[in-house]
């Protein structure tokens, strides 16, 4: 008998009503976290956000449990966002659809491969999902569109005017870093961390490698970082221009939590709304 893997709920915000046929399901799946949102596209509002912690070693069963919990809802569209770190950005002219580079760098068996076109940046984002996760998604929905979390982060503009921007999105164990400099995307990468000093090390190393000034680069924070946390205090000690991701131009469910906790899902909503 298969053991039930109870999902650890981190946030459950918004209406408890079932989604209607006018809703788009936004589903983000990663190593340590899965979340979904019900996007009502006619009014550009998000009616519900659910976030759960996952265990990488029980991910298959936990994804199945999450999908089972969505039974009974009706969606006119399903968009799945991979938050797995297996992704590479290529200049468009050098991209080939054999995905050899992903295999060489990540050495991940049993993967389903995808790519997102970024014509405005003349780039391609190539990435993969575990075969087992892909199979569960295809069994659960009649039609699914796939995207990688780097893609909405790159596409969705912000109000920051700076030649160099480092966007840093936090989960409990990983940071996703996006570097835009001189109107180009120079880096999109995921790093594991255990302490605030790990985060500082990565950010300082990126600044060194790309010739960024700690006084001039703008750090844009989002995800699970509190303004009164040791982590935020440590970042302030090394960088002078620090912002939190701005309020999205989309209706949000009422919540006591800062809007920037959910920037990743808002970016995804902005790309499909």
Image: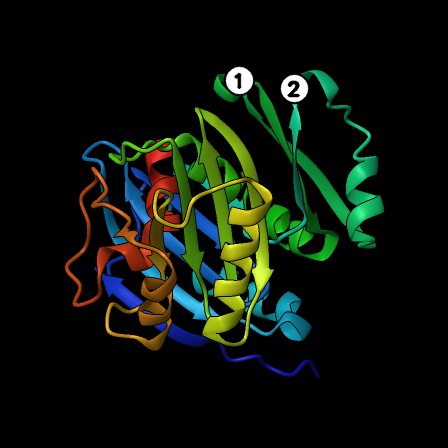
Give the residue drawn at x 59%, y 63%: 31
Measure how far apart labels 2 and 1 are at the Cα level: 8 Å
Colour scheme in use = rainbow
Quick one: label 2, few (<14), some, or many (20+) residues within 10 Å? some
Which of 221/27 is in front? 221
Find disc 2 in the rendering and name its residue: 92
- Residue 144, visible in the rendered structure: no
- Residue 129 image offset from top left, x and y in percent: 67, 49
- Residue 78 image offset from top left, x and y in percent: 46, 41
* Residue 197 - label: none
Give the residue drawn at x 32%, y 33%: 162
Left or right position of 55 against 86 = left
- Residue 102, visible in the rendered structure: yes
Quarter of the image where the C terminus is located: top left
Circle 1: element type: helix
**Mark 2 and 1 residues: CB-CB less than 8 Å, in contact?**
yes
Which of 80/20 is in front? 80
Q: Count every numbered label the image shows and give the total.
A: 2
- Residue 154 image offset from top left, x and y in percent: 45, 34
Find disc 1 in the rendering and name its residue: 119
Asked which quadrant contains residue 95, the reply is: top right
Which of 153/6 is in front? 153
Asked which quadrant contains residue 183, the reply is: top left
- Residue 197 image offset from top left, x and y in percent: 49, 72
From this view, report whether residue 34 is shown above or below residue 119.
Answer: below
Quarter of the image where the N terminus is located: bottom right
Q: Earlier in the sequence, mark 2 or mark 1?
A: 2
Circle 2: element type: helix
């Amino acid at each position: 008998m298969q053991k039930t893997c109870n999902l650890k709920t981190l946030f459950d915000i918004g209406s408890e009503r079932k989604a209607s046929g006018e809703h788009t399901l936004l589903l983000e799946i990663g190593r340590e976290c899965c979340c979904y949102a019900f996007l009502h596209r006619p009014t550009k509002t998000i009616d519900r956000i659910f976030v759960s912690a996952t265990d990488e070693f029980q991910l298959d069963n936990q994804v199945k449990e999450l999908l089972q919990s969505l039974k009974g809802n009706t969606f006119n569209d399903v968009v799945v966002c991979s938050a797995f770190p297996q992704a590479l950005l290529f200049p468009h002219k050098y991209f080939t659809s054999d995905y050899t580079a992903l295999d060489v760098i990540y050495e991940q068996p049993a993967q389903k491969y995808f790519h997102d076109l970024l014509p405005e940046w003349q780039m391609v984002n190539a990435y993969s999902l575990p075969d087992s996760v892909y199979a569960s998604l295809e069994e659960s929905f009649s039609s699914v569109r796939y995207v990688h979390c780097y893609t909405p982060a790159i596409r969705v503009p912000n109000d920051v005017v700076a030649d160099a921007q480092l966007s840093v999105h936090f989960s409990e164990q990983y940071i996703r870093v996006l570097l835009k400099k001189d109107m180009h995307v120079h880096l999109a990468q995921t790093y594991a961390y255990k302490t605030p000093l790990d985060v500082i090390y990565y950010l300082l190393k990126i600044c060194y490698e790309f010739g960024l000034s700690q006084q001039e680069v703008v750090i844009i924070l989002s995800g699970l970082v509190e303004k009164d946390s040791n982590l935020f205090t440590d970042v302030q000690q090394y960088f002078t221009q620090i912002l939190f991701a701005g309020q999205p131009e989309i209706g949000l469910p009422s919540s006591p939590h800062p809007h920037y906790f959910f920037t990743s899902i808002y970016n995804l909503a902005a790309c499909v709304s």
